[in-house]
Image: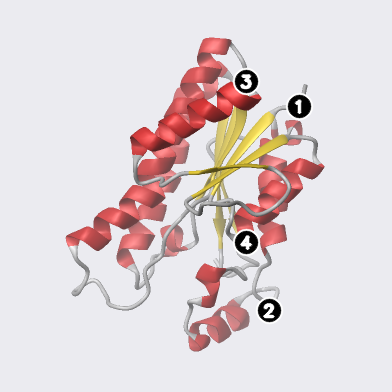
Amino acid sequence: MAKVAVVTGANGRIGEATCQRLAQSGYTVVGIDRGPTGIGNWAYYPCDLIDVDALRETLARIEADHGLIRVLHNNAGIYHTGGNFLEHTPELFDTTMDVNIRAPYFAAQFVAKRLIAAGESGAIVNTASMAGVLGSMQIDYAASKAAVINMTKSLARSLGRYNIRVNAIAPGLIETAMGAQAHPGVRKSVEASSSLRRIGQPEEIASVVNFLVSDDASYITGTTLDVSGGTG
């Protein structure tokens, strides 16, 4: 029976590419996003990740419909353009933290509890960002992604005894809707500073996620992989 893999933010370009890649690897893929309908030929469940109760209910329905969730890619994220630290409101800050760190925290908690109760192994991959490593003018975003990196290390320490691996990826600028929000000058700067002299593609992120949840990465946990084309 195929392992069930859940991807949040499944309607974004990285989410869609990851769903596609995991499906090709034989997983039963389930996407979660806030839109009423999903992209791709896999099961889809709409959910507002800010509502943790709704998230738990959605994950429970997925488990009831498809079986134990063995793989979780906490991919959904939010990035606000415009304004700066001196202008950000508490509401803006809270929304960023709710989506980028609170939702993956409780999604991982739900999946880990179920895996431990079933005595099964599993793999969790969190989408961080190079902004969480290097900092960013969007301070709320960078802070939330730094928290994702620390959460990943801490979860790996906590869950390793149950054979649940937890890793993260730190993408640089990728050709996504979020990447398109970057100022043209920033894009040119990233291309110039990249060792590969280009912006990354969603499929290149998906391949790394696929590796991290596979048996080929069976001795990797607590790691955040730089997937930035050498811009870090």
Q: Which residue in the protein does label 4 denote?
A: 13
What residue do we see at 49% from left, 61% from top? 130
Q: From the viewer's side, name the closer residue of 217 and 54.
A: 54
Q: Which residue lies furthest to the front in this view?
A: 36
| Residue at (67, 73) in percent of width and height | 195
Where is residue 214 drawn, in percent x and y? Answer: 72, 35
Q: Residues within 10 Å of mark 2 (few under 14, many from 20)?
A: some
Mark 2 or 4: in front is: 4
Q: Earlier in the sequence, mark 2 or mark 3?
A: 3
Q: Which structural element holds mark 1?
A: loop
Quadrant assignment for the C terminus = bottom right
| Of pointers 2 and 1, the one earlier in the residue sequence | 1
Q: Is residue 12 left or right of residue 53?
A: right
Residue 68 figure quarter = top right
The three-letter code of the residue at mark 2 reads Arg
Badge 4 amino acid? Arg
Q: Could you tell me which secondary element the residue under label 2 belongs to?
A: loop
Identify residue for label 2: 197
